[in-house]
Image (cartoon, rainbow, N blue to C red):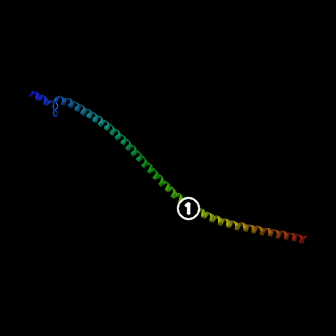
Amino acid sequence: LQAQQGSDDEEPGAPAASVYKTQSGGILEVLEDLKEKAETELSELRKGEENTKHTYNMLKQSLEAQAAQDKKHLDEEKSNKAAAEEGKATAEGDLETTTKSLGNSKQELATTQGVCMQTAADHDATVAGREEELKVIAEAKKILQDTSA
């Protein structure tokens, strides 16, 4: 009977207890290795996530600062544009006034030139008339001197 039990232990289907001990130690080592690898990978992923988060925050801060700077610049440009438009409106008003004044001045110049030309013509006529009178007086004086002499 014992011989038969010994042969039953060797039959396939139920391995000896020592076989389980060897295999269970290997499984535990594999599980420990997997656990260490998982913890290492988790740690690396967390570091990567922190680095990514830090990079994101830096980029966000940079973009927010750039947006604020751009808004400030836009506000300055709007202010400058408004001032330029006001200056343009003032300059256009001044141009219109100056153009009207120039037109009036040209009209006055034309009138003054006409009056001046008329005065010059009248002066020339007066001078010619005086010269004629002087000639007549000189001739009359000569005649008087000839008759009285």
Q: Which residue is mark 1?
A: 97
Would you place residue 143 above or below residue 105 in this image? below
Q: Residue at x 40, y 43 (%)?
A: 62
Mark 1, Cα crowd under 10 Å, few <14 / some 14-19 / many 20+, is: few
Q: Position of residue 88 (x, y in %)?
A: 52, 57
Q: Residue at x 87, y 69 (%)?
A: 142
Answer with left or right where residue 111 lies relative to residue 17.
right
Q: Return the residue nearer the eye: 123 or 72.
A: 72
Mark 1 residue element: helix
Q: Position of residue 19 (x, y in %)?
A: 19, 30
Q: Return the residue nearer the eye: 24 or 64.
A: 24
Answer with left or right where residue 131 lies relative to residue 12.
right
Q: Split into 4 quadrants, where in the image is the C terminus?
A: bottom right
| Residue at the top extreme of this rendering | 3
Would you place residue 1 above or below residue 94 in this image? above
| Residue at the left extreme of this rendering | 1
Quarter holding residue 34: top left
Q: Residue at x 17, y 28 (%)?
A: 18
Q: Residue at x 60, y 64 (%)?
A: 103
Amino acid on which the number 1 mark rests in the picture: Thr
Quarter holding residue 132: bottom right
Answer with left or right where residue 59 lies relative to residue 43.
right
Q: Position of residue 50 (x, y in %)?
A: 33, 39
Q: Position of residue 110 (x, y in %)?
A: 65, 65
